[in-house]
Amino acid sequence: MVSLILGALFFVGIHIFISGTRLRNTLVARLGENGYRILFSLLSLGGIVWMCIAYNDAPYAPLWGRIEGLIPITMVLVFVGFLIGVPGLLMRSPTAVGGEADAGPLRAVGILRVTRHPFLWGVTLWALGHLIANGDVASLIFFLGFLVLAIAGQFSIDAKRQRRLGPRWQSFAAVTSRAPYGAIAAGRNTFSLAEIGWWRIAVAILLFALLFWLHPMLFGVRPYPLW
């Protein structure tokens, strides 16, 4: 369990205290943009592998336990997370890695109309759903790490883009929102299914179905015990 805690602290810490601060600028100045991205990607991958190994090795210590009646809620949260997160990965975005380098106005189109951080909201809903479904100490540490990072990362990215892009970012932020549908509900944007693209939605559904089917083989747990 100690290894899992340390792994979670390492993974969350490098994002909050390096990626989200001016220390990143210092490292970029020394390593170059590509050098920094390679180093940070390796550290992130190492953190995820560390957490996964420690999670699998951690003893089972129940908290509220597995409540079968809550599993449908988990499935809905994860499915919606796929519908938001996958389209976010399949389009250019100023909040994605390297997206801030695009010249010209920042366009709030497609899934960015729903939230300017679609992938991070996908991770948020995935982690929240798994927290509900797995009521033990190891799962709390593991999935809470991703949940905290996905939420805190949105504020970190906004701050970085504000520093780097200035007025261009302010114009983009004015018509988008961190919270899903926040800008739409406030009348600052409109929903456009056509811009999201049916093919992106189809990819999200197919990936969800594939992982649902492979879940017992990949992770040793049936996502829905009645199936």
Image: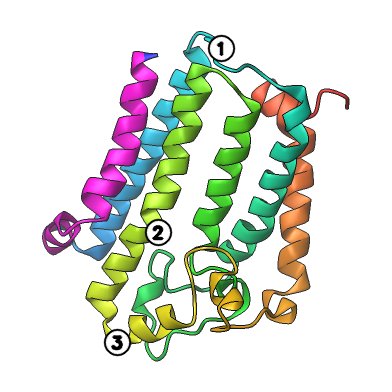
Whether 32 is drawn above or below 145: the answer is below
- Taking the spot 70% from the left edge, 80% from the top edge, the residue there is 192
Q: Earlier in the sequence, mark 1 or mark 3?
A: 1
Q: Residue at x 77, y 54 (%)?
A: 205
Vertical position of residue 102 compared to residue 25: above or below = below
Q: Is residue 154 above or below residue 111?
A: above
Q: Which corner quadrant of the image does residue 23 belong to? A: bottom left
| Residue under numbered circle 1 | 62
Residue designated by label 3: 167
The residue lying at 40 percent from left, 59 percent from top is: 154
Q: Which image quadrant: the C terminus?
A: top right
First-in-chain label (1 vs 2): 1
Q: Is residue 206 or residue 79 the one in the foreground?
A: 79
Q: Quadrant of the N terminus?
A: top left
- Does the magenta-highlighted stretch encompass residue 114? no
Amino acid type, mark 2: Gln
Q: CA distance from mark 3 to mark 2?
A: 19 Å
The magenta segment: 2-30
Q: Is residue 123 left or right of residue 149?
A: right
